[in-house]
Image (cartoon, helix red, strand yellow):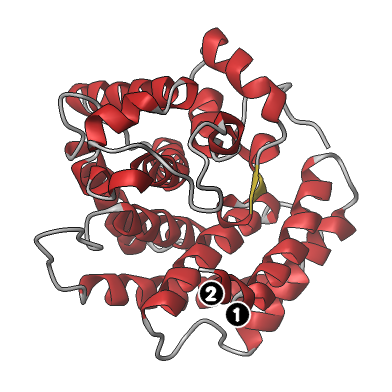
Amino acid sequence: YAASQVGARPVYDWLGAIQAGAAEWLRGGPPESAACALAPLDAWARGAALLGDFNRQAGYHRKWALAGAATGFLAIRDAPGLDPVAVARVTAWFASVGRAVQASHDRIQPNPFVNASVNNQGTWAGYAVAAAGVAAGETALLQWGLRRLGETVEQVNGAGALPQELARGRMALHYHLFTLQALAPLLRIAEANNFGLSPPGEAALARLSAVVVASLADPGRMASLAGTQQAHLTNPDASDTGRYMRDAQGLEVLLGRRADPTLARMLAPYRPFREPRMGGNVTLLWGPRGAAVA
């Protein structure tokens, strides 16, 4: 895990440059701030970055980078004065990277245990490809991403858990939170493009959200479902509920969709939520109005 993060650092430095400009623009900055976000995107588009052959772990970082970059672009694409040639180059590149992520995901072989075609990695692929599709104006990419939304929600069981992530055992809560980090913005993208969940899908999402919120307050709730005490990816102390709360970006996105005073009070001490794979400042981009802070 640590070696993967070190190797991917240039990708996240690049995302940081994009997202800093986008955040400044969203806070009322001048159009130049949006141009500053576009410049690193255009540099990578010119170099055809994120294309070619990737191993499995690099492929994960590619889809996460695509999700974060496309989200940042969507925040600034309507800013005045952007270079239309650069915008066209970037949107065409998003389409190419989106198709590469789609093809990579479609090649995954089914696995009877933890299956990356339908677990959190499938949800992240859906978010990345859908965001790229909106950015590029490619309906086929958007629709492919939205199918991953349906596949994820359909897996929620009667207890409100995702069986693929329960199979993680002691990491089940971490991976439920990680899935929500992709599922929630994917749902918001769907709704912004006149797609939504069916009533059974809404009920499944409500069950999933409820069990995650309950497990944030008491990781023992997820432990009872997974059959083992919970741990965190970067901190083995399951009693550190604050560590889990800092991974609640998906719940912040859902709160921006629908008010919930109890959840709002729970999340407030941890704002602003940040995650480069979701566009940077999640509270600013996706959270409820009035919640964004520096």
Number of the label disc, if any, that sits on residue 169: none
Q: Position of residue 85 (x, y in %)?
A: 69, 77
Q: Secondary structure at mark 1?
A: helix
- Residue at the spot x=73%, y=62% of the render? 16
**Can you see residue 84?**
no
Up-down: is 225 above or below 93?
Answer: above
Between 37 and 255, the one lying in front of the other is 255
- Circle 2 residue: 4
Q: Which corner quadrant of the image does residue 294 belong to?
A: top right
Q: Residues within 10 Å of mark 2 (few under 14, many from 20)?
A: few
Circles 2 and 1: CB atoms closer than 8 Å: yes
Amino acid at circle 1: Gly
Up-down: is 32 above or below 282?
Answer: below
**Can you see residue 101?**
yes
Number of the label disc, if any, that sits on residue 7: 1
- Residue at the spot x=33%, y=30% of the render? 222
- Going by the picture, which residue comes out furthest to the left? 112
Q: Secondary structure at mark 2?
A: helix
Q: Which corner quadrant of the image does residue 41 belong to?
A: bottom right
Amino acid at circle 2: Ser
Q: Position of residue 207 (x, y in %)?
A: 28, 22
Q: Is residue 82 left or right of residue 106?
A: right
